[in-house]
Every structure is written in C-alpha cells, then in structure tokens.
Image (tube, rainbow, N blue to C red):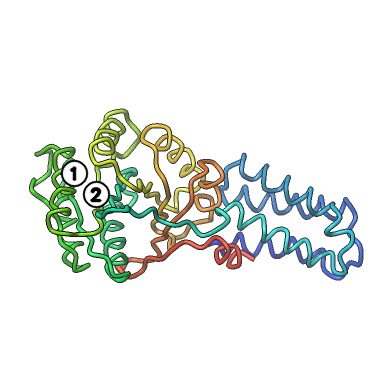
C-alpha cells in the first residue's frame, strides 16, 4: 500500500534538493505535484485542499526562509502534515472503569467485520484481557457460524444463542451477551453487528438500537481500505446515523492507493485505532500515524 503515492511525493520533493533558497514558484510547483499525487490516490478533495494549503503556508513561512537547508525543512513540513491528516497522536481505546468494556463493531457488509472481530479478540487476549465475542449479526447468511469459527481460531469464546440467517433479535442477543460477560467475568465484550451492501435506514436503526441497549464504551467503524475516498462518504453516513468513536481499516495489505487512510480522519474527526494487514488473525496492529507517514515518505 502507498507505494505509488510514496514514489510520487518523494519525486516531487526531490526537485527542491540542492537549492539554497526556495522561491514561491518552487513551492507552488511542488504543491501542485503533491496535490495531483493525492487526488490520484483517491484522497477526498476537501482533505487534499486543507493539506496542501497548510503545507504551502508553512513552506512560504519563516521556518523555511530562515532554515539552513530549506528543502529538508519542506520535507519535514510535509511529514508533519501527513501525521496530522492521519490523526496526529496514536489513538487510545476507552476502557470501562468497571469491566466489562463493551466494544461494538459497525460497517458495511463486505468490510470484513466478522474476521476483524476475531482479530481484535485475539489481540485483546494477547494483551492480557479476557474477551467474549457476541454474535449479533443475525442477518447475513452463516454470519453466526463464521464468528464461531473465527472465535475458535482465536481461542476466544463466542456468545451465540441464536442461529442467525434471519432468526433472532440482535438487540436482545447483544444485551444478553453483555450480561453473560459480567456473570462470567470477561473484561471485554466485542459485539459483531449486521451490515448491508449499501447504506440504508433499517441497518442504521438496528445499529442504533444495539448501541442504545448496550451503551458501548467504543463503537468502531470497520471500513475496507481499498474503497478509497468512498470510505469517507460511508464513514460520514455512519458517524451521523449511528455515531462511532474510532476507525479500523481492514484489507490494508491489498492494492489500496491510500485514499481511505488519508481521508477518513480529516473528514470525520475520528481516529484510526487499528489496521488489519493480512489474512491471518495475527496480522492486526495498532495504527500509528507517525509510522504511516514515515512509510509514505
């Protein structure tokens, strides 16, 4: 991921090297090339506009004009602003003062929520927690069975009282899942919810009903990193329709141009907390904006 974007931004900055003083024309040429690279990477136009505006303002400011190596200073500015676009500081989960911490997963069908639930549970377990997975996606065919298989692979128990495939009340399952976690002394509950192939009001209402019933400490929006700036549009719909506290990027190992990662925080003002980086349950990691910016540059 990001290879093409990385090559193009790096190439645009190379033109500045070796110059003792940068003119406004030099800066504008570089900004134009960076803007084209970001747009081609499918970054949301509003984010590109803000990003390049901030870089230009700083690149023409005192910190560059008085620098011994102005080109290197511009590279640092681009890096700093990439970190900001990606969220700034590394985001942290909110933990319950009195366990269990309830984490609800939301997103479109096909984003990889169910597999992601297993990855998150496995990561939680490796961090010393005792998670319980709750199968509240009772709509998608075989979703309950899939979560049971994923939970078994992760070595994490699954609360699945209903067969799914259209049978059962997802709100009741979510509520009973949290109660079961309290009784069995699990310190984390991860609630898998239903998605749709597209945004619709029925899905949003069901997600709102589950949210209101279990009052999650975190609602994580799971989004396919390969859908580019469409991720920002879908994220806005979920933010306004359900509300979420953080983002998880799935399929970050795929042929993604970077649009989702670089758009979503700027558009929604919510941090990316985790990234899924491969097929195996272990290929899952915290998202660090500074490290991602370094990969791009």
Q: Quadrant of the C terminus?
A: bottom right
| C-alpha separation, residue under disc 1 versus residue under disc 2 | 7 Å
Image: 240 above or below 129: above
Residue 159 placement (x, y as % from top left): 13, 53
Q: Earlier in the sequence, mark 1 or mark 2?
A: 1
Instruction: Using residue 166 as the reference point, say whether residue 70 is left or right of it.
Output: right
Circle 2 Cα neighbour tier, 10 Å, few/some/many (<14 / 14–19 / ≥20): many
Which label belongs to residue 174? Answer: 1
Residue 227 placement (x, y as % from top left): 45, 48
Q: Nearer the viewer, residue 63 or 275?
A: 63
Residue 71 lies in quadrant: bottom right
Q: Nearer the viewer, residue 74 or 253?
A: 74
Q: Nearer the viewer, residue 163 or 36?
A: 163
User: Residue at the spot x=25%, y=33% of the render?
Assistant: 209
Circle 1 Cα neighbour tier, 10 Å, few/some/many (<14 / 14–19 / ≥20): many
Circles 1 and 2 in contact, beta carbons < 8 Å: yes
Residue that badge 2 annotates: 191
Which label belongs to residue 31? Answer: none
Instruction: Using residue 56 as the reference point, say whether residue 242 is left or right of it.
Output: left
Instruction: Using residue 98 as the reference point, say whether residue 165 is left or right of it.
Output: left
User: Residue at the spot x=14%, y=39% of the render?
Assistant: 172
Residue 251 placement (x, y as % from top left): 39, 58
| Element on which disc 2 rests | strand
């Amino acid at each position: 991921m990001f290879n093409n974007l990385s090559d193009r931004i790096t190439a645009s900055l190379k033109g500045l090297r070796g110059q003792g003083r940068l003119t406004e024309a030099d800066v504008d040429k570089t900004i134009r090339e960076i803007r084209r690279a970001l747009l081609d990477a499918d970054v949301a136009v509003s984010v590109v506009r803000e990003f390049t505006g901030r870089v230009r303002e700083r690149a023409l400011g005192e910190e560059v004009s008085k620098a011994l190596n102005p080109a290197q200073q511009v590279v640092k500015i681009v890096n700093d602003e990439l970190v900001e676009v990606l969220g700034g500081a590394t985001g942290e989960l909110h933990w319950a003062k009195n366990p269990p911490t309830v984490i609800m997963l939301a997103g479109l069908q096909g984003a990889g929520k169910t597999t992601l639930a297993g990855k998150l549970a496995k990561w939680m377990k490796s961090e010393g927690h005792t998670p319980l997975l709750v199968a509240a996606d009772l709509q998608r065919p075989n979703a309950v069975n899939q979560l049971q298989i994923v939970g078994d692979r992760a070595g994490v128990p699954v609360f699945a009282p209903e067969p799914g495939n259209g049978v059962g009340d997802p709100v009741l399952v979510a509520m009973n899942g949290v109660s079961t976690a309290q009784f069995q002394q699990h310190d984390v509950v991860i609630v898998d919810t239903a998605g749709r192939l597209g945004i619709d009001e029925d899905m949003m209402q069901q997600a709102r009903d589950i949210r209101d019933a279990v009052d999650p400490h975190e609602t994580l929006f799971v989004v396919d990193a390969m859908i580019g700036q469409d991720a920002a549009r879908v994220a806005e719909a979920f933010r306004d329709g359900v509300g979420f506290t953080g983002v998880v990027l799935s399929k970050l190992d795929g042929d993604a141009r970077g649009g989702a990662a670089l758009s979503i925080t700027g558009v929604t003002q919510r941090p990316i907390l985790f990234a899924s980086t491969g097929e195996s349950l272990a290929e899952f990691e915290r998202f660090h904006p500074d490290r991602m910016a370094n990969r791009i540059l």
